[in-house]
Image (cartoon, rainbow, N blue to C red):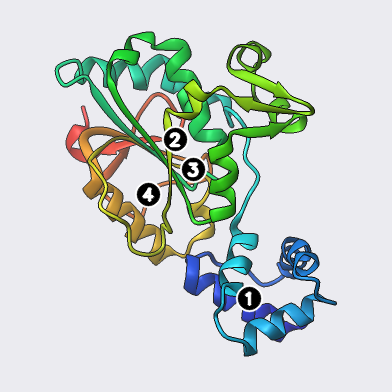
């Protein structure tokens, strides 16, 4: 693709999602947008970008952004954070919320739903007492297509093979041909909502646990700072923020401290240190 075409996509992605597309990522644009070219029955990527550049914003801008930002996900991705959730974080939150018997959890940038469903499965499997609690488990993403897939809770064999223990597959999924669907009892635990992290957030309740994993690595510094500031205003004083393994609050927002000795990507507000 030409440098001009790459720059057009790069600017659109930055404006709409705050994601920075580094030089040399032309191959990524080509691979991500190839299916959209076929879906729209266009002759080439060049034709798609020409339509983007000269035509009205009739949904094509959103389609291109969604195609670029949608990433693969997996169940119980990166085993260590989920072990920390099971052994340390959830027991601590449950102990501190016994009076109100309620928990608010937000999985941001949830893609096709494997992460929030992993949290739901962990709660149902290891903390049965929470069945009588008021649990709000919200999941959000910028992509409407990803949210539609997530709401359905239907995954192919390859997807359920990635990170999902066989015992949980048998216990909580129903087989439909070559696909597996989460039982309604688990799907109903998660409420999906469209939220663009780089733009205005809707009114949200104060959160006990926020997961924003493996997405801020793609944002510029200003966007990272803005998101972390918004999270600090949303997080309860003793709540937890979980970031991806390559992400940190260091040199971005001094409101947080890393929860040690977990080394699993959990942060709390500085006021809770010690």
Taking depth in this image into account, of 238 and 99 the one nearest to the observer is 99
Q: Nearer the viewer, mark 2 or mark 3?
A: 3
Mark 2 or 3, nearer chain start: 3
Observer-side mark, 4 or 2, equals 2
Q: Secondary structure at mark 2?
A: loop
What residue does disc 1 label? 9
Establish if 13 lies above or below 35. Answer: below
Q: Which mark is residue 250?
A: 4
Could you say whether the residue bearing mark 4 is in a helix, strand or loop? loop
Q: Is 47 situated above or below 99?
A: below
Residue at the spot x=25%, y=52% of the render? Answer: 203
Residue count near mark 3 (Cα–Cα under 10 Å), binned few <14, some 14–19, many ≥20 = many
Q: Quadrant of the N terminus?
A: bottom right
Would residue 136 appear left or right of 53 to someone viewing this image? left
Q: Do the residues bearing badges 2 and 1 touch, measured as CB atoms within 8 Å?
A: no
Q: Position of residue 46 (x, y in %)?
A: 78, 81
Residue 141 lies, in percent from the top left, at 48, 51
Q: CA distance from mark 2 to mark 3?
A: 9 Å
Dot label at residue 213: 3
Q: Callout 1: few (<14), some (14-19), or many (20+) C-alpha neighbours within 10 Å?
A: many
Q: Mark 2 to mark 1: distance in Å?
A: 32 Å
């Amino acid at each position: 693709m030409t440098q001009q075409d790459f720059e057009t996509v790069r600017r659109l992605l930055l404006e709409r999602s705050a994601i920075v597309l580094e030089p040399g990522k032309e191959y990524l644009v080509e691979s991500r947008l190839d299916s959209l070219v076929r879906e729209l029955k266009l002759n080439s990527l060049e034709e798609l970008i020409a339509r983007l550049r000269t035509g009205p914003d009739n949904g094509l801008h959103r389609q291109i952004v969604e195609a670029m930002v949608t990433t693969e996900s997996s169940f119980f991705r990166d085993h260590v954070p989920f072990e920390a959730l099971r052994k340390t974080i959830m027991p601590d939150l449950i102990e501190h919320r016994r009076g109100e018997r309620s928990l608010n959890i937000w999985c941001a940038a949830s893609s096709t739903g494997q992460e929030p469903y992993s949290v739901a499965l962990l709660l149902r499997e290891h903390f049965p007492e929470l069945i009588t609690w008021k649990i709000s488990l919200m999941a959000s993403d910028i992509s409407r297509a990803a949210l539609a897939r997530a709401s359905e809770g239907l995954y192919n064999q390859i997807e359920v093979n990635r990170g999902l223990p066989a015992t949980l597959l048998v216990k909580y999924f129903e087989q439909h041909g070559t696909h597996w669907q989460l039982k309604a009892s688990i799907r109903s635990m998660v409420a999906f909502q469209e939220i663009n992290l780089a733009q205005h957030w809707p009114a949200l309740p104060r959160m006990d646990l926020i997961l924003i994993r493996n997405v801020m690595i793609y944002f510029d510094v200003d966007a990272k700072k803005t998101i972390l500031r918004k999270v600090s205003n949303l997080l309860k004083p003793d709540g937890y923020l979980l970031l991806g393994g390559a992400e940190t609050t260091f040199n971005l927002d001094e409101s947080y401290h890393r929860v040690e000795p977990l080394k699993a990507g959990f942060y709390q507000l500085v006021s809770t240190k010690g």
